[in-house]
Amino acid sequence: MKRLSTIALIWGALLAPIPLQAQINRPSYVSRPGPGNVQHLAYIVAREKKFYDAMGLANVSIVVLRGNAMNV
């Protein structure tokens, strides 16, 4: 009986889930075409309210591209 409980304990330890950590946290870029448009306010609010972090995107950078929307 002791041997059976020892085997069960070993199997339980080997099959337990192990949390994994990401190796590299590369930045994610959100691009928008030019500064100062009300339509792009949602990107800024999402970054400030940590919505990107809740979705698993820890390192989000908002990039403003010069030119029109065709560049994005």
Image (cartoon, rainbow, N blue to C red):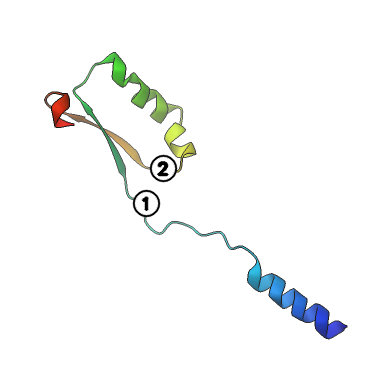
Three-letter amino acid code at disc 2? Answer: Ala
User: In the current view of this chain or complex, which residue is farthest to the top?
Assistant: 38
| Residue at 21% from the left image edge and 20% from the top image edge | 35
Residues at marks 1 and 2, CA–CA distance in whole angstroms: 8 Å
> Which x, y percent locates residue 5?
82, 78
Left or right side of 34 for 42: right
| Labelled pair 1, 2 in contact (Cβ < 8 Å) | yes
Circle 1 SS class = loop
Marker count (numbered)? 2
Work out which quarter of the rendered image holds the N terminus and state it.
bottom right
Quadrant containing the C terminus is: top left
Q: Which residue is mark 1?
A: 25
Q: Residue at x 30, y 17 (%)?
A: 39
**Viewed as shown, does residue 1 lie left or right of 13?**
right
| Label 2 Cα neighbours within 10 Å, binned few <14 / some 14-19 / many ≥20 | some
Residue 70: horizontal and vertical position, in percent? Answer: 14, 28
Residue 35 position (above or below residue 59) = above
Please name the amino acid that badge 1 sits on: Asn
| Kind of element beneath mark 2 | loop
Q: Which mark is residue 10?
A: none
**Mark 2 highlights which residue?**
58
- Residue 3 pos. (x, y %): 82, 85
Position of residue 6 relative to residue 17, above or below, is below
